[in-house]
Amino acid sequence: MAKNPNPLTEKVLVSTDTKQALMSIREPGERYGDVIERVLQDRKRHDFIAHLDSIAKEGEFVPLDSDPEYAALKKGIRRESKHRKAGTAVR
């Protein structure tokens, strides 16, 4: 169970069906507030991914391969992965 630094001060009224739904997804030791917080985090993550998907579908992009800074980073990553495969340290 995650420790919430915020004190519990509010009551939330929910229907019997909603309470049963919360009970069905509650993990051992979780309070209803923890379940609601987890559901909200999942929703935020879902919304963010949907936002990224819409950008990917509708956005205009500049090819990174033409960017010298990106090319240097890419080269460094290739060099690092080559050394990891060989079992040697990167210096």
Image (cartoon, rainbow, N blue to C red):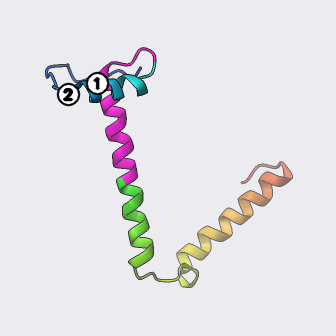
N-terminal-most mark, 1 or 2: 2
The residues bearing labels 1 and 2 have C-alpha atoms spaced at a distance of: 6 Å
Going by the picture, which residue comes out furthest to the right? 86
- Type of secondary structure dominating the magenta stretch: helix
Secondary structure, mark 1, is helix
Q: Amino acid at mark 1?
A: Lys
Q: Where in the figure is residue 22, as x and y percent of width and height? A: 34, 27
39 over 8 or under it: above or below: below
Secondary structure, mark 2, is loop
Q: Where in the figure is residue 39, as x and y percent of width and height? A: 35, 37
Left or right: 10 in relation to 71: left
44 over 61 or under it: above or below: above
Highlighted magenta segment, given as a residue range: 28-46
How many tags in the picture? 2
Mark sitting on residue 53: none
Q: Where in the figure is residue 81, as x and y percent of width and height? A: 74, 58
Given contact means CB atoms under 8 Å apart, are the residues at marks 1 and 2 in contact? yes
85 over 23 or under it: above or below: below
Q: Where in the figure is residue 58, as x and y percent of width and height? A: 39, 78
Q: Which residue is mark 1?
A: 19
Q: Amino acid at mark 2?
A: Val
Q: Nearer the viewer, residue 16 or 39?
A: 16
Q: Nearer the viewer, residue 62 or 60?
A: 60
Going by the picture, which residue comes out furthest to the top? 29
User: Residue placed at 20% from the left, 19% from the top?
Assistant: 7
User: Residue placed at 72% from the left, 58% from the top?
Assistant: 80
Q: Which residue is mark 2?
A: 14
User: Residue placed at 41% from the left, 82% from the top?
Assistant: 60
Q: Residues within 10 Å of mark 2 (few under 14, many from 20)?
A: few
Q: Nearer the viewer, residue 11 or 90?
A: 11
Q: Can residue 37 be found in the magenta stretch? A: yes
User: Residue placed at 39% from the left, 69% from the top?
Assistant: 54
